[in-house]
Image: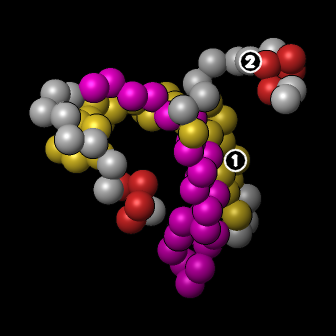
Amino acid sequence: MDHAISHFHEGEPTRFERISEFIGTELAYIVELERTRVKIGGSDELSPIALRVTTIFLLEDGDWKVLHRHADPITTPRSIDSIIQ
């Protein structure tokens, strides 16, 4: 997380779009599109970015805690041919 965060600074969230969610007795997840504006690298200008994010939560001692979070910039559907190398 520290490495990923080091590339972005002075950002602001603009919108969170919930795609899917599930809440069980001890496990839950959400899939969202996170839209933000951030300064990337050494830039002084805010740039819009969108990430597809999956977050998994675990209920521990009565509190929901983040067990796993994955984010990537793929926010639109892709054909199977686009991933074949």
Quarter of the image for residue 50 reads top left
| Image x and y of residue 71, in percent | 56, 45
Q: Residue furthest front?
A: 85
User: In front here: 25 or 45?
Assistant: 45
* Colour scheme employed for the rendering of this structure: secondary structure
Q: Which residue is mark 1?
A: 22
The label shown at residue 11 is none
Q: Is residue 54 above or below residue 63?
A: above
Residue that appears at 42% across and 54% down = 4
Q: Which residue is mark 2?
A: 78
User: Is residue 57 highlighted in magenta?
Assistant: yes
| Image x and y of residue 8, in percent | 29, 46
Secondary structure at numbered mark 1: strand
Residue 27 visible somewhere in the drawing: yes
Question: Hey, what amino acid is under mark 1?
Answer: Phe
Dot in front, 2 or 1: 2
Q: Which residues are magenta?
A: 47-71
Earlier-in-chain disc, 2 versus 1: 1
Q: Is residue 11 above or below residue 78?
A: below
